[in-house]
Structures are given as C-alpha cells and as structure tokens.
Amino acid sequence: MIYFALAKGRLAEDSAALLEKCGVDTSVLQKKTRKLILKSEDGKYGFFLVKPSDVPTYVEAGVADLGIAGKDTLLEQGKDLYEMLDLKLGECKLCLAGFPKRHDLLTNPHLRVATKYVNTAKKVFSERGEEVEIIHLNGSIELAPVTGLSDVIFDIVQTGSTLKANGLEVLEDVYTGITARLVVNKVSLKTKAAEILPLIGKLKEVVS
Amino acid sequence: MVFRKLPTGVQDILPEECRILTAVRDKLSKKFRLCGFEPVLSGALEYYDTYSDIVNKIPQERMFKLTDTDGKLLVLRPDVTLAISRIAATKLANPHTRLCYFADKWDMQEAGGMTSREIYQAGVECLGEEGAFSDAQAIAFSIECMRETGIDGLIVDIGHVGYFKGILEECGLTDAQSEEVRELINAKDGYNAERILRKAGAKEKTLNTVLAMPTLFGGAEVLARAEALTENPRALSAIAYLKKVYSLLVEMGYEDCICFDLGTVKRLSYYSGIVFSGLVKELGAPLLSGGRYDNLADDFGKHIPAVGFAIGLKRVLVALERQGKLPEKQMLDAVVYCEEGGEGVAYAHFSKLTGEGKSVRLCASYGVEEEVAAERYLATKEGVKRI
C-alpha cells in the first residue's frame, strides 16, 4: 500500500482532484469524516490528513511515501526528501510587505520582521548580511506592522487583498512561483518504485 | 527531577533492547573477523582544530564541543571515517589494510524521527585500495553484513559523484552556485536547478543533462541513458567505472539487489567516486551508507585511496523489528539454587556448568524460585540434585 500525507483544507481537495485524474481512487476523501487515516476502497492507497506544515515531517520519516505540500513549507523546513514535481496548484509568492513609507525609529536600529517562516526569513536576511529581529507569529501576520509589533512582515501573498485592507503593500517579491509540490520519501522511491514511478509519470502528464 | 533525564537526542538502551543490539553486534563482529577486517577504535575526544582546519571540514555547528583544562577546544568524535583516516595516515606503518569498528559518533543536529545525536555505528574501511573490484567487494560485503543480521530484501542504491561533478564543471558556476545546484539535484528539484543554471548562462545541452539527472535512477539501464546524455570525459569515465562495478557484482551474484541513482549527490561529502546506500522498504531512511574517499587522508598528510561504509545499528534494530525478525530471547541453559550450607557445592557445580559452555545463573538467595531454564539444580551440604 502507498501512503499519502495530504495537507488538510483546500489543498487536500485540489490534490484529491488531481490524483483522481491519475487513476487514484480518492472517493474516500470526498466523504465527511473525522477519521485521520483513510483507505481507498481498492486497498491500494492510504491517506493521512495532516496540518500543512507537517506534511514534510511525515514524508521524511517514511511514515508516508508521498506527500503534497506547499513550496513555502518545504523551504521553511528544509527536510531531506525528494521534490519530484511542481503540481502548479495554489500559486502565490513569499514577500516582504509593510507600509509604503518606512518609519525609522531611533530606539529600533534593527528592522523588525514578523513572520511564520522564521528559518526562511533568517536565511534571506543572513545572505544579505542584514541584521534583523525576527518575530515569530502563527497567524494574522498583517496585524504586526499595523500595531507596531514589527516594521515589516515576511509572508505568503496570493491576491494581496488582506495587505491592502490593512494599508500595507508588497515591498519586495522574495520567492515567486510558490506552488504545491509532490514530495517523495527517499527510500520509498527506490523500494516501492513499481507503484510510485507510474503514478509520478501520470501526474506529470496531467499537470503539463 | 530534570537532572534524572537525558538531553535531547540521546537514549539509554535498556537490557531488553541491548540484548538484541549485542546479538546483532556479535554477528557483525564475527563476520568482520571472518572476512579479514581488523578492529580499531579511535579516541572519543579530539581537538576541534583537527576537523575544522581541513579540506573536508565538519561544519562547526554539527560538532559537540568541550573545553580542555588548558583552554583548548575539544570535540566528541564527529565522524568515524575521518578519525580512522587520521589514524591510518599518521600512525600506521602500512596503511594498506582493512579495518572495522563499532563506535559512537556525535552529531549536534536537530534530533527526531530517524535521527539522533549519539549514533552507534558499525563499519569497515578498506584502506590503500583502488579499482572497481575493491568497490564491488565493499558493496557485496555490505549486503552480506545485512543478511548476517537477518535483514530481508536489502537494495543497494549506487551512484558516482564524478558524473555530477563532470557535468557541472561545464556550466561555469561559482562554488556557491554549484553547491546550491547540488542540493537541488540531490532533492530531485529540477525546477529550481533550472532557474539557477539559466541565470548562470549554462548551455542548452548541459542544462538538459543536469535537468535529466533527478530522473537518472532505476536498474542498470540507467547507465546507458546517462551515457547518452553527455560528452564530458569525467562524467563518461564515471559511467564506464559504474558499468565495470556492476558487471563484477553480477558475476559475484548480487544482480538482484542493485539499483542506480546518478542524481544522488550527498551533502558536504568527502566521497570522490562511487557512493552507495542500503535500503529496505520497511524503513524511510538508509540502513547503511558508504563510498569511495580517495583524497580524505590527504588532509592528514598521506594519500590513501579507500572505500568503506557505516551501518546505523539502531536503524537495523528498527528494521528487524518491523520485519518481525528480531532474534528471540535465549532461555538460560541452567539455574543453580542452593540451601544454607550448600554454597561451596553450588559454586563448584556452577563453575563446572559454565566451564562446559552453558549459560547458568547461580541464585544468591536460599531456596528454590520459579524460573524458566532448561535445567534446574539444587545444591545442599550433601551434594547437587536435579529438580
């Protein structure tokens, strides 16, 4: 049996639709249930529904053979796995955003950056040789500059409407082309090649 | 309370597990000896500078550091192969030798899942050897070692760093860019590798080859596919070499457990030629990994070509358990009880039995207890009787 780790929510629905097109029986994912492990009726596939940021963890450990996760999560976590395919789902970008005009504060020589993506932000600023203060938040990142918690935010931007509604704008596109990716456990790809490779082949066709 | 706990990433191995670990180690130890490997053990503490000032340096954030009484910085053995390479280059009169070890290494990485920070390894190093037959032997021996422990269905995934290096040297990348591309290819992320290569102005043909690398894995047919993709002499000689190793492995009877992956380019590695890792489908991480590291000893002042591999013993135990192949608990051959006054008789009988090679427990308290053993004896002043 091949196990998938799928991100709960919209990405899971889109992923299921994509897998269905490749001949994977995903009818079990359409049913309303609170179960976290679901098995396809033909007994060929198992699905774990996990928090999006947990997908790489399940796949790296080999508990799940394959997973579908956002490139933002993969960048942030830097797990040791194979990133096999760009599924071109849910395209967005990782941006620095803030007020159009920066208010320099004498008591805050460092730029304060609020973000969910702490590791990625550290990497970006250390590559630039810039010293910044990173403030870790788990949601509603846009609130940080509005309330004065931070100067800017480093976050995912899809339409930009939340930014706009709060008087913020994109200052810089840092990573573009952030989409959902098919990730595969490094050992599973070799030991379960007969099942996994044809599936990757079909996904590739469907995506392009 | 907190001081009764262990720090993150290290484990106590309790008797039940330790019994199995010891059994596996004994099997490997016997195998190593039978195949002509001499055991060696390096000091657990070394100078920090030994591993930070060399070409193949270990990143400082990965080493556990201590301060010596003279203020010098020490590290806990960060890598066994490096330590053995140092020993061979600086202390062995004849560094043409086959060595084996059972040793811990410490890695200050984030622990969790399949990784820990204290890693108990078994391994071998074939020093002063070159050529395809040496590599084929190392690969074959890694398969035999796993069979010896009881592991089923091992696949050895083989690559060669020369293929990647050869193709990449044509792209005109800076060192930092090369490293970035290597990381992306290793993760099979062709999409981002393409972005960097295009930015660096790589030629279309080279670009196509690099982008095909993540797909260059599978059976022996991969070698022909890889060969057709390039004209780079270094890459082609890597393929020719792999073909030679493959034909030797086929001749030696290991055709069924070999596959290839030319897109495997390990992180910060000292490997200079063939690289391989041992996989089973029950475990999401390799059981063993190794390769050829011809230039490693150069760091310590002598050129000693070599090939070797290391087995993660914890992973072997996990895989054995998942395969339902853990060695069974051995019942004691005998137990000797005694009554007051019969201590001398009991001890003499206990010595006799152990002398015959039996496993025996001599009870310290008087009287008979419930215990499972094949033979049970009771010693009194008058003598020993079987019960």
Image: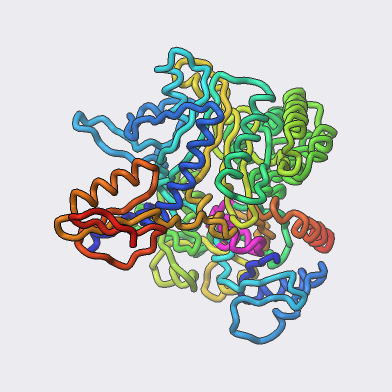
At 62% from the left and 39% from the top, the residue drawn is B144
At 85% from the left and 33% from the top, the residue drawn is B228
- Magenta region: which residues? A58-80
Quadrant placement of the N terminus of chain B: bottom left
Image coordinates for residue A119, horizontal then vertical, percent: 48, 55
Say if the magenta span includes residue A205.
Answer: no
Outermost residue to the left = B341
Is B342 placed above or below B173 here?
below
Does residue B171 show up? Answer: no
Quadrant placement of the C terminus of chain B: bottom left
Image coordinates for residue B253, horizontal then vertical, percent: 74, 36
Front in this rendered view, residue B279 or B143: B143
Q: Is residue A141 shown left or right of residue A175?
A: left
Front in this rendered view, residue B38 or A103: B38
Q: Quadrant of residue A37?
A: bottom right
At 59% from the left and 77% from the top, the residue drawn is A36
Does residue B229 show up? Answer: yes
Image coordinates for residue B285, horizontal then vertical, percent: 57, 51
At 67% from the left and 50% from the top, the residue drawn is B153
Outermost residue to the top = B93
Is B257 placed above or below A166 here?
above
